[in-house]
Image (cartoon, rainbow, N blue to C red):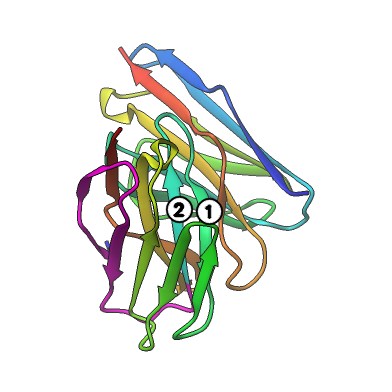
Amino acid sequence: GQQLNQSPQSMFIQEGEDVSMNCTSSSIFNTWLWYKQDPGEGPVLLIALYKAGELTSNGRLTAQFGITRKDSFLNISASIPSDVGIYFCAGQGVIQGAQKLVFGQGTRLTINP
Amino acid sequence: SQTIHQWPATLVQPVGSPLSLECTVEGTSNPNLYWYRQAAGRGLQLLFYSVGIGQISSEVPQNLSASRPQDRQFILSSKKLLLSDSGFYLCAFGQGKDQPQHFGDGTRLSIL
């Protein structure tokens, strides 16, 4: 099925470093979402983007919706241990008549203290 | 506030046994409801979605079924589990056009 291209697949960084990950798609989406998933739990919404070119921040997180509505990036500044987890991008739109999400493959973030 | 609950959190079942996972949403009405499966370390695969009571759409052929007996209740079932049904099952709800989906905490299903 449809899938977004998310990179990198994994990151190993030192505490305090900045993080950047991105997603691209061949399709246009109305909404672009970034989720974080901790082990054994469901994904938690971090940032929602609704307008092309929109730049939104949530604390140390910043995300932008591409002008073409086909890509997005997520930046995390000054990483801390609780940032560890898997980050998923997701495009949301009407697909085959229903509101659905298309997910990226995820970026696994590991932080060395 | 809107909340979503899934249970059980973990489940170990023998091959061939039936399954029933339940998901309920509070604080909203007429939500879109979704069941996903997630293989270890992988992305989420949409299994079923529902736009209203009794309305179920299946995304992939499989050994599972879904039902929505009430507006805020979504159930994932199977009559006979297979080994390949093992995985992490997530329920989600969405409210309104372009509003983000929110996920429950998931059920870890292990088939022996």
Please tell me which residue lies in front, B26 or B32: B26
**Disc 2, SS:** strand
Are the residues under marks 1 and 2 on the same chain? yes
Please tell me which residue lies in front, A55 or B69: A55
Query: Do residues under tags 1 and 2 come within 8 Å of each other at their CB atoms?
Result: yes
**Disc 1, SS:** strand
Query: Where the C terminus of chain A falls, by quadrant?
Result: top left
Please tell me which residue lies in front, B61 or A108: A108
Q: Residue tagged by mark 2?
A: A35
> In this rendering, does residue A99 appear at all?
yes
- Identify the mark at residue A45; answer none if there is no mark: 1
Identify the magenta region: A3-31
Category of crowding for the residue at label 2, using alpha-carbon neighbours closer than 10 angstroms: few (below 14), some (14–19), many (at least 20): many
Taking the image as shown, residue B96 lies to the left or right of residue B86, namely right
Taking the image as shown, residue B43 lies to the left or right of residue A77, namely left
Category of crowding for the residue at label 1, using alpha-carbon neighbours closer than 10 angstroms: few (below 14), some (14–19), many (at least 20): some
Mark 1 or mark 2, which has the lower sequence index? 2
Q: Residue visible at 21% across and 47% down?
A: A10
**Could you tell me the amino acid type at mark 2?**
Tyr
**Could you tell me the amino acid type at mark 1?**
Leu
Q: Residue visible at 36% across and 17% down?
A: B16
Please tell me which residue lies in front, A6 or A54: A54
Host chain of mark 2: A
Q: Does the magenta segment cover residue A13?
A: yes
Q: Position of residue B62 (x, y in %)?
A: 34, 41
> In this rendering, does residue A2 appear at all?
no
